[in-house]
Amino acid sequence: EAQVTQNPRYLITVTGKKLTVTCSQNMNHEYMSWYRQDPGLGLRQIYYSMNVEVTDKGDVPEGYKVSRKEKRNFPLILESPSPNQTSLYFCASSPLARSTDTQYFGPGTRLTVL
Amino acid sequence: GQSLEQPSEVTAVEGAIVQINCTYQTSGFYGLSWYQQHDGGAPTFLSYNALDGLEETGRFSSFLSRSDSYGYLLLQELQMKDSASYFCAAAPGANNLFFGTGTRLTVIP
């Protein structure tokens, strides 16, 4: 089944404890992106990647890191999480190397930082 | 900066037609997308307009006017399952995407 998977789906952690949220797609898509969703703010783009080893900042990149060593994986790294990073996170991918193409979203990761 | 404005809530009757508007202000513009999100679910793609005019996909249509920095999503023959949040998203460049804050559509019998 063609899909975008994220792990974990739920995570409660404490301030300062490094964590990684994994994202994987099995559709050979070029473009991948991370978003956070907060009430009243909609979805905001954190980072995106046009292809392997090509990443760039979105609207709200502070406090996050990403890597794209393989085409299928695009992990989101929080080196020192803070409570203001408590949010619902979505990974997305699209077939072509552009944001305007159909983006397929993963199921989301609900992160709570205490 | 980038900004997209859409109504926060809309209520409509089953079987009716509803239009959700979106006005945008971006540093560049490649096109306008629409996504649907049910409570507890992930966003799903509905449509994309790069050029002025109307794009139709089944019961859903999307319109863009680049000169007015305006677009809308039109939902016809509303069904209860259409109750969801709808987001417009503008692409200032080919690589990034900015979403509006969403319109919560409630369909009533």
Image: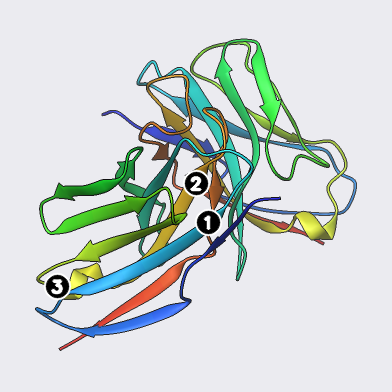
* Disc 3 versus disc 1: nearer the observer: 1
| Proximity of marks 1 and 2: CB atoms separated by less than 8 Å | yes
Where does the N terminus of chain A fall, quadrant-wise?
top left
For disc 2, the marked residue is B90
Task: Give the numbered dot on residue B86.
Answer: none
Please name the residue that numbered disc 3 is placed on. B79
Are labels 3 and 1 on one chain?
A: yes
Could you tell me the amino acid type at mark 2? Ala
Q: Earlier in the sequence, mark 3 or mark 2?
A: 3
Label 1 Cα neighbours within 10 Å, binned few <14 / some 14-19 / many ≥20: many
- The answer to whether mark 3 and mark 2 are in CB contact below 8 A is no
Mark with earlier residue (3, 1): 1
| Residue closest to the eye, B82 or B71 | B71
Instruction: Please identify, in this view, whether the residue under mark 3 or under mark 2 is nearer the observer.
Output: 2
Label 3–label 1 contact, CB within 8 A = no
- Residue B25, given in percent of the width and then of the height, sits at 58, 54
Residue displayed at 51% across by 13% down: A71
Q: Quadrant of the C terminus of chain A?
A: bottom right
Residue appearing at x 59%, y 23% in the figure: A49
Q: x, y (%) of residue B18?
A: 23, 74
Name above or below for residue A81 compared with residue A19: below
**Amino acid type, mark 3:** Gln
Task: Give the amino acid type for the residue marked by disc 1 in the picture.
Answer: Tyr
Q: Chain letter for mark 3, please.
A: B
The residue labelled by disc 1 is B24
Disc 1 with disc 2 on a shared chain: yes
Give how far across and how far down residue B1 sits, in percent: 71, 50
Q: Are marks 3 and 2 on the same chain?
A: yes
Q: Disc 3 to disc 1, how far (Cα)?
A: 28 Å
Looking at the rendered structure, the secondary structure element under dot 1 is strand
